[in-house]
C-alpha cells in the first residue's frame, strides 16, 4: 500500500508542475543567473548591473525610463541599481537639460572600458552551455517571441527593440 503522501500526489487533479510554462522559465532564469555569476564576479558586477550596462553600451545616455522599457523594470528597481553603478564609478547620472524630471545615465571611462572585458562573458557562457549554435539561435528567437507575447498580454509592449 502506498504511503499517504504518494497516494495524495497520485490522486491530485490540480495543475502539474512539469506541465506549466512558468516553472521552466523560472528555474531556467535562476540557473542562467547562477551560470553568469562567476563570470560577472570577475568584473565586480551583479547580473542586473550587467544588464543595465549592456543597455548603456548600446545606448549611452539612456534615461531611467528608456532603460526600464528595455529591461522590463520600473524606476523603483532601477534607481538604486543605477546609484550603485554611479557609486562604483561606472555611470554618471545627469538631469536632462530638456526636462529636469528625466535622469540620463552616461558611462564613465571606466564603465566604457568594462565593455571590452565583458565581451567574453557571453562567449564563455555559450561554450559552457555546449549547445549547437543553430539550436541556441532558435531557442533565443522563440524566447524573444514569447517575451513579446507576454509583454503584450501585460499591456507592456512599448519596449524598443
Image (spheres, rainbow, N blue to C red):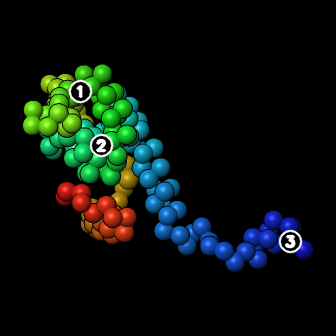
Between disc 1 and disc 3, the foreground one is 1
Residue 52 placement (x, y as % from top left): 28, 40
- Vertical arrangement, residue 80 with respect to residue 11, above or below: above
Q: Residue furthest left?
A: 98
Give whichever of discs 1 and 3 has the lower sequence position. 3
Would you name the residue on which mark 2 appears? 51
Disc 1 from disc 2: Cα separation: 13 Å
Closer to the camera, 118 or 17? Answer: 17
Q: Which residue is mark 1?
A: 90
Q: Disc 2 vs disc 3: which is toward the camera?
A: 2
SS at mark 1 in the image: loop
- Residue ID at (37%, 40%): 76
Q: Residues within 10 Å of mark 2 (few under 14, many from 20)?
A: some
| Quadrant of res 47 | top left
Q: Residue furthest right?
A: 1
Q: How many labels were placed on the picture?
A: 3
- In the picture of the structure, the residue carrying the numbered disc 3 is 2
- Relative horizontal placement of residue 10, taking residue 63 as reference (left or right): right
Q: Secondary structure at mark 2?
A: helix
Q: Residue at x 17, y 33 (%)?
A: 100
Q: CA distance from mark 1 to mark 3?
A: 59 Å
Q: Which numbered disc, 1 or 2, marks the residue that appears first in the sequence? A: 2
Q: Quadrant of the C terminus?
A: bottom left
Q: Residue at x 27, y 63 (%)?
A: 157
Separation of marks 2 and 3 at Cα, in angstroms:
49 Å
For the point 50% across and 55% down, which residue is it? 27
Amino acid at each position: 500500500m502506498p504511503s499517504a503522501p504518494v497516494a495524495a500526489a497520485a490522486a491530485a487533479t490540480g495543475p502539474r508542475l512539469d506541465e506549466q510554462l512558468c516553472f521552466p522559465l523560472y528555474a531556467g532564469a535562476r540557473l542562467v543567473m547562477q551560470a553568469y555569476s562567476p563570470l560577472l564576479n570577475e568584473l565586480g558586477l551583479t547580473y542586473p548591473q550587467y544588464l543595465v550596462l549592456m543597455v548603456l553600451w548600446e545606448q549611452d545616455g539612456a534615461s531611467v525610463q528608456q532603460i526600464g522599457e528595455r529591461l522590463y523594470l520600473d524606476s523603483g528597481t532601477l534607481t538604486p541599481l543605477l546609484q550603485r553603478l554611479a557609486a562604483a564609478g561606472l555611470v554618471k547620472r545627469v538631469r536632462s537639460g530638456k526636462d529636469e524630471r528625466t535622469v540620463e545615465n552616461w558611462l564613465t571611462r571606466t564603465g566604457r572600458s568594462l565593455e571590452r572585458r565583458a565581451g567574453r562573458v557571453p562567449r564563455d557562457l555559450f561554450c559552457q552551455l555546449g549547445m549547437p549554435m543553430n539550436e541556441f539561435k532558435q531557442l533565443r528567437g522563440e524566447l524573444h517571441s514569447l517575451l513579446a507575447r507576454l509583454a503584450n498580454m501585460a499591456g507592456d509592449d512599448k519596449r524598443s527593440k
